Amino acid sequence: QVQLVESGGGLVQPGGSLTLSCAASGSILNIYAMAWYRQAPGKQRELVAKITSAGSTNYADSVKGRFTISRDNAKTTAYLQMSSLKPEDTAVYYCNAQRLVVPVTYNYWGQGTQVTVSS
């Protein structure tokens, strides 16, 4: 099992910045990717950004150039640096970890952290 704990959400004005953190614990040895998803009211959960153990990243088009995903050297904590925030970035942000135990891929989720962009 993998436990994920997110932190860093809150209220920020449009154009502001915020950094989310996701700390993984438990059976972290085989985690090969971590990601951030978000879900706005009435909408489906969507992928925001993903980073693999090799350091490859990919982003949703809506956040490219504004958000940056990273991991610490121990690969136990993932970060999402968000800048130039817009009201449409308002959502609950969820951390996700993918763990491979051949041949099965397991998905783990954090509890979510609210990000509200409003003046």
Image (spheres, rainbow, N blue to C red):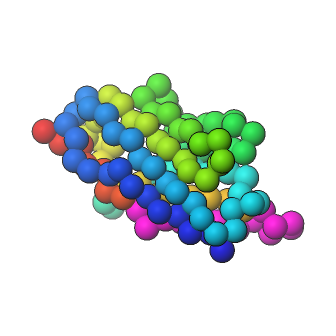
| Residue found at the very far left of the displayed protein | 119
What secondary structure predominates along the stretch shown in magenta?
Answer: strand
In percent of the image, x 19 and y 37: which residue is there?
A: 13
| Residue found at the very far right of the displayed protein | 102
Give how far across and how far down residue 9 sits, in percent. 32, 51
Give how far across and how far down residue 57 sits, in percent. 64, 36
Q: Is residue 40 visible?
A: no
In percent of the image, x 69 and y 44: which residue is there?
A: 52
Give how far across and how far down residue 76 sits, in percent. 61, 53
Give how far across and how far down residue 32 sits, in percent. 73, 52
**Is 103 part of what is drawn in magenta?**
yes
Q: Quarter holding the C terminus?
A: top left
Span colored in magenta: 100-112
In percent of the image, x 39 and y 41: which residue is there?
A: 19
When the figure is inspected, residue 16 is found, relative to residue 90, above or below; the finding is above
Q: Quarter holding the N terminus?
A: bottom right
| Residue found at the very far top of the displayed protein | 65
Query: For residue 100, which quarter of the picture?
Result: bottom right
Q: Is residue 107 left or right of residue 61?
A: right
Q: Is residue 34 left or right of residue 103?
A: left
Q: Is residue 92 left or right of residue 119?
A: right
